[in-house]
Image (cartoon, grey):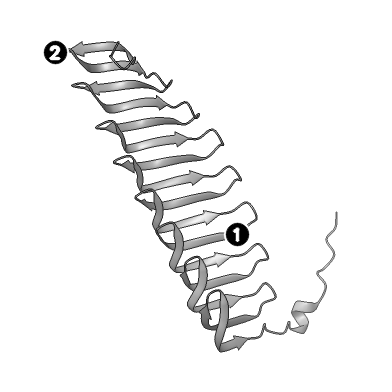
Amino acid sequence: TYPDGSVYKGTFRNDLANGMGKITYPDGSTYDGQWVDGIIEGDGRATYPNGVVYEGSFKNARNDGEGVMTYADGYQYKGTWKDGQRDGTGTATYPDGTVYSGDFKDGLRDGTGKITMADGFVYEGQWSKGEIEGKGIATYSNSDVYEGMFQSGKRHGTGTMRYGSGEAVTGEWVNGALQQQADAVQPPQPSEQASEPPSAVSE
């Protein structure tokens, strides 16, 4: 038992926690896993009063390496950590069913990644500091597809929108809206052959 009320049960070496052990803190937080010279280091499981659970690798008492963190509301991150932050490649699953798989930096989506939202929206491409930024492809729930540049999560720069109707338009986009149209392509008219009804299929 430590002066602050923390209770440690496990192995010691030179009066320091070493090897496997579990500590319970006054606020109810716990850590059960590996220790090196009194410091949380290696693989283990940490729980917190707010319902957060982390299971994975630690370095100098911080999440570092591969690990899974689950929140009480259902959010989960599984992937690489660095110095306590999501950093590297991982998958984040949100309570509403949204899933992001890709790169993280300093706890934010940053690099290349793909997000699939519950309403059917899908984006795959570049991210910066948590936002869609750079080049990518967005597929909207109404089947429209935009391929081009984004800024702060909005269509911005050169890009092509292919509508579900078959029409396509390429041009310069500003803050999500088409400003200068380069060209528009009408969908090809169906040939007579293509418009013929399919032959009956026997049951």
Q: Is residue 161 left or right of residue 42?
A: right
Q: Which residue is mark 1?
A: 121
Label 2: state its secondary structure: loop
Amino acid residing under circle 2: Asn
In percent of width and height, residue 156 lies at 49, 75
- Does residue 119 sit above or below 181 in this rendering? above
In the current view of this chain or complex, which residue is farthest to the front? 3
Label 1: state its secondary structure: loop
In percent of width and height, residue 35 lies at 25, 22
Q: Is residue 164 left or right of residue 30?
A: right
In percent of width and height, residue 153 lies at 50, 65
The quarter of the image holding the C terminus is bottom right
- Does residue 64 sit above or below 27 in this rendering? below
x 34%, y 50%: residue = 106
User: In the image shown, does 176 or 164 lie closer to the viewer?
Assistant: 176
Query: Is tag 1's residue or tag 2's residue first in the polypeptide sequence?
Result: 2
- Does residue 92 sit above or below 150 in this rendering? above
In percent of width and height, residue 131 lies at 46, 60
> CA–CA distance between discs 1 and 2?
57 Å
Q: Which residue is mark 2?
A: 14
The image quarter in which residue 95 lies:
top right
